[in-house]
């Protein structure tokens, strides 16, 4: 996996002290690519934890500190936003489970250090979805994707509501009732996730997923998704979770048992392979051997993921990277929908692209 592991961003993540001997050109490449991957603040946090940040040359240190301050400001905003969400849902009595970045932050996990946030994701019981949405709308959140087809797509076929945006704060909230589409090939039981969720101390009615479930959700989010614009950042999240939770020996056994129970063995296999291969995550040999795919399948997946999991920056890509990302985009849709629905969805999208925007209609 030398191609992916050889990028300056991955080198800095795997061996932070090594950057102290870098040339100005290497620093420039790192800053550009890490910024595009939303990992510049993560690298800054790692260097600070190792008490190395002050030894970085002046120019890149300024960029690292700026990225770190932005991430800290976003973390404060997430705290305020979750407080507003819980206030809005107080009368519903629904337990809210935080997902992804917000969960790492409230659980005070190392994965939150230097983490960049774009929205807040929550998981609620499917039978409470209408009540939750109504309560949020009463407190200023409005549904996006207003086209009738988009509303039907999310509400009938996907595992979440259309993204909600607050009319005053412009913050984005994703409300999930599952971690994978009900139309998809893999069908994890969200009731089991909710039943095992762990309370957040000091925050009544607020929870995060159990450790194994948190890893499995992160793996499913990355490897069942058609969009990999933040693929390397998501892989770094999984790496941080595995390093933290993996310190307990029983974690690895629980992780594989839970993956089988939730129908998420394949995403876990990919997560273990690529975190270990790219980021050097210490995965026990017996844990990594759970994936039993034919050699040709791993060869094909490696050719795709080792390109797609690079920073989205021209200097980090080769001539086959766009093709790899397009192939994984198609694969993601294939995993999320049965053939008839996928054909219908692509037809609607094609017709929409051919139709001029509403702002241009009638303006001839």
Image (cartoon, rainbow, N blue to C red):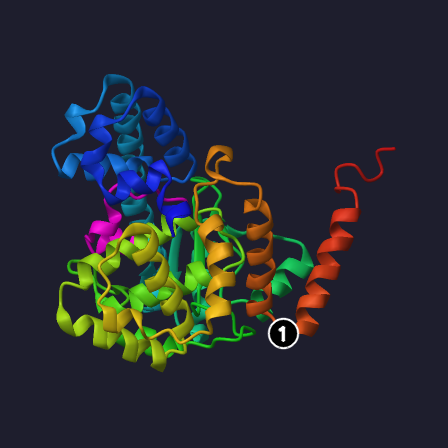
Q: Nearer the viewer, residue 19 or 135?
A: 19
Q: Where is residue 176 in the image (x, y as percent from the top left)?
A: 44, 64
User: Is residue 257 one of those drawn in magenta?
Assistant: no
Which type of secondary structure does the marked residue at label 1 adopt? loop
- Quarter of the image holding residue 64? top left
- Can residue 282 be seen here? The reply is yes
- 54 relative to 347, above or below: above
* Quadrant into which the C terminus falls: top right
Q: How many marks?
A: 1
Residue pictured at 36% horizontal, 68% vertical: 268
| Residue 167 falls left or right of residue 41 | right
Q: In which quarter of the image is residue 183?
A: bottom right
Q: Which residue was labeled with disc 1?
A: 338
* Residue at screen point 26% across, 65% down: 205
Where residue 253 appears, as percent x and y from the top left, is 22, 76
> Is residue 7 left or right of 284 when viewed as pictured?
right
Residue 119 appears anywhere in the view:
no
Chain part drawn in magenta: 102-119
- Residue 229 x, y percent position in the rendering: 48, 46
Where 356 falls versus 186 (above or below)? above
Measuring 15% from the left and 58% from the top, which residue is drawn there? 202
Q: In this view, does 195 lie to the left or right of 364?
A: left
Q: Where is residue 7 in the image (x, y as percent from the top left)?
A: 38, 39
């Amino acid at each position: 996996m030398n191609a992916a592991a050889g990028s300056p961003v991955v080198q800095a993540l795997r061996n932070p002290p090594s950057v102290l001997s870098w040339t100005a050109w290497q620093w420039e490449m790192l800053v550009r690519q890490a910024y595009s991957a939303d990992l510049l603040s993560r690298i800054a946090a790692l260097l600070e934890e190792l008490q190395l940040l002050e030894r970085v040359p002046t120019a890149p240190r300024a960029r690292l500190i700026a990225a770190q301050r932005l991430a800290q400001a976003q973390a404060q905003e997430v705290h305020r936003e979750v407080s507003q969400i819980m206030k809005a849902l107080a009368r519903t009595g629904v337990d809210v489970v935080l997902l992804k970045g917000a969960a790492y932050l409230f659980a005070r996990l190392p994965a939150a250090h230097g983490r960049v946030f774009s929205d807040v994701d929550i998981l609620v019981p499917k039978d409470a979805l209408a009540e939750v949405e109504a309560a949020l709308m009463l407190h200023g959140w409005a549904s996006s994707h207003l086209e009738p087809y988009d509303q039907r797509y999310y509400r009938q076929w996907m595992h979440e509501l259309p993204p909600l945006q607050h009319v005053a704060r412009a913050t984005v909230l994703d409300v999930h009732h599952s971690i994978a589409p009900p139309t998809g090939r893999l069908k994890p039981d969200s009731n089991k996730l909710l039943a095992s969720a762990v309370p957040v101390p000091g925050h009544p009615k607020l929870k995060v997923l159990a450790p194994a479930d948190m890893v499995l959700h992160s793996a499913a989010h990355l490897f069942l998704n058609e969009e990999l614009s933040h693929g390397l950042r998501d892989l770094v999240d999984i790496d941080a979770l595995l390093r933290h939770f993996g310190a307990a020996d029983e974690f690895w056994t629980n992780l594989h048992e839970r993956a089988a129970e939730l129908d998420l063995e394949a995403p876990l296999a990919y997560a273990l392979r690529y975190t270990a291969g790219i980021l050097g995550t210490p995965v026990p040999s017996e844990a990594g051997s759970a994936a039993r795919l034919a050699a040709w399948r791993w060869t094909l997946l490696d050719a795709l993921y080792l390109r797609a999991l690079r920073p989205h920056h021209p200097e980090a890509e080769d001539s086959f990277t766009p093709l790899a990302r397009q192939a994984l985009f198609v694969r993601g849709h294939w995993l999320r929908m049965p053939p008839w629905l996928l054909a219908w969805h692509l037809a609607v999208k094609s017709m929409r692209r051919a139709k001029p925007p509403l702002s241009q209609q009638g303006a001839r």
